Amino acid sequence: MVQKSEFSKDFDKNKQRIDELFHVDKSFDLMYRVVMIGGKKACFYLIDGFCKDEVMEKILEFLYKITPEEMPETAHDFLKDKLPYGEIDLVRTEDNLIQRLLSGVPVLMVEGYTELLAMDFRTYPARSVDQPEKDKVMRGSRDGFVETVVYNTALIRRRIRSTELVMEMHTVGKSSRTDVVIAYMGNRVEKEMLENIRERIDAIDIDALSMNQQSLAECLYQHKWYNPFPKFKFSERPDTTAASILEGSIAILVDNSPSAMILPTSVFDIVEDADDYYFPPVTGTYLRLSRMVINFAAVVLTPFFLLLLMNPQWIPEWLKFIEINDPVNVPIFLQMLILEFAIDGLKLASMNTPNMLSTPLSVVAGIVLGDYTVSSGWFNAEIMLYMAFVAVANYTQVSFELGYALKFMRLILICSTAAFGLWGFIGGLAFVVIAVVSNKTISGKSYIYPIIPFNRKQFLRRFCRVSLPRSEKG
């Protein structure tokens, strides 16, 4: 059933209504152009910066040639017979008009028609699809997502040329009207989970996704945010996103965000990296296991070192060299906490430092923290060494969210060990395990699958990089 139009055949009445709705007299970038087409008044509405000038000129040149005798009686016939450009839809409601025009789609209003014509020849300001700064690889493709959702869907389509690939468009936010795309393989996705995601997105009642994907993530998963372990996997790489979609996952793309949100996600999905698959299975397995071991060591190394220093009688002879022989002016656990915050301070400083000053900042920070702080007696060299390892270990995996979750767990371990000794260390480890195991994916499944529930085949695939499966020839 065709929806009844909210507009009339009175051109001046429609124009006055639209001008008031969009505050045309106040917004300098919302432009309109009144022209004559086939002896009838017409008006183009468009957003400056979103319109392809060359296409606009060609369409106007074509429309100016239409004579009064050739003018169709309805907007549908005009669309079908007189417009040479293909991406054209009829606009019948104010809500549809707002969505189309403010998304950058030029709209044509013609005297005598109760529908408006939306002609999609817009273009978005966008940067090039360069390799992401964070998700770099030693080998593989060098393109990455940008802030324009249409470009991002094209990068995925380029890799998955299947009729089963579906890109569903949704709109979220009363004021922002942000485009949100759900990408999945129709024959591989779990139907119940897909329907659950659809319902959650459509039920979001928010004014604007002011923080893009983070705002959407908090709306989709509103419980247990006190658990710092990430509920979603974020990737700026289209090859990683395409591989996840082919495995049956759902990718959510948000306009103005240069990354994809992949779900459902277990902790093993987050730890995986693109380099695992761009190298032979043996090398990929080594890289994956190395990353897991380093991340585990980054959590327990400094608390365990603190425990041994608190109980030097437990240190075996072959590890006696780890004892601190220099004077300790500041308690060890305070040194660790201060350095944890100092490392974060350096990260924030590096992000806000102009490129031309980043090298001098690194040199100054290295000299001050690496030499003067030790010689002044604030820190001991051994503590500096272990904290340097922790700082470097945080960069072995691409997920910022997982990196900070592991950092919080390490801080809890340090504090509990300093306060209660061995039992504090054991209790802290138990807390870390509970935090990981009790976390749930958005689908409600286990965060540590395939360990719980145990799946032997998937368990081996999570730890060992195996050869890609091959299709059987029929």
Image (spheres, helix red, strand yellow):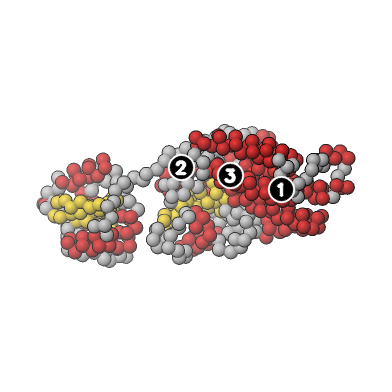
Whether residue 212 is situated above or below residue 135 in the rendered picture: below
Q: Nearer the viewer, residue 11 or 229?
A: 229
Distance CA(mark 1)–CA(mark 2)? 47 Å
Residue 353 in sight from this viewpoint: yes
- Label 3: element kind: helix
At x 20%, y 45%, the residue is 60
Q: Which mark is residue 155?
A: 2
Q: Is label 3 or label 2 in front?
A: 3
Distance CA(mark 1)–CA(mark 3)? 18 Å
Q: Quadrant of residue 428?
A: bottom right
* Amino acid, disc 2: Leu
Q: Which mark is residue 347?
A: 3
- Label 1: element kind: helix
Dot 1: within a 10 Å radius of its alpha carbon, few (fewer than 14), some, or many (20 or more) residues? some
Distance CA(mark 3)–CA(mark 2)? 31 Å
- Sequence-wise, which precedes: disc 3 or disc 2? 2
Q: Quadrant of residue 16?
A: bottom left
Q: Are marks 1 and 3 in contact (CB under 8 Å)?
A: no
At x 59%, y 55%, the residue is 231
In the picture, measured across the screen, residue 392 lies left or right of residue 13, that is: right
Q: Which mark is residue 335?
A: 1
* Amino acid, disc 3: Lys
In the picture, measured across the screen, residue 205 lies left or right of residue 369, that is: left
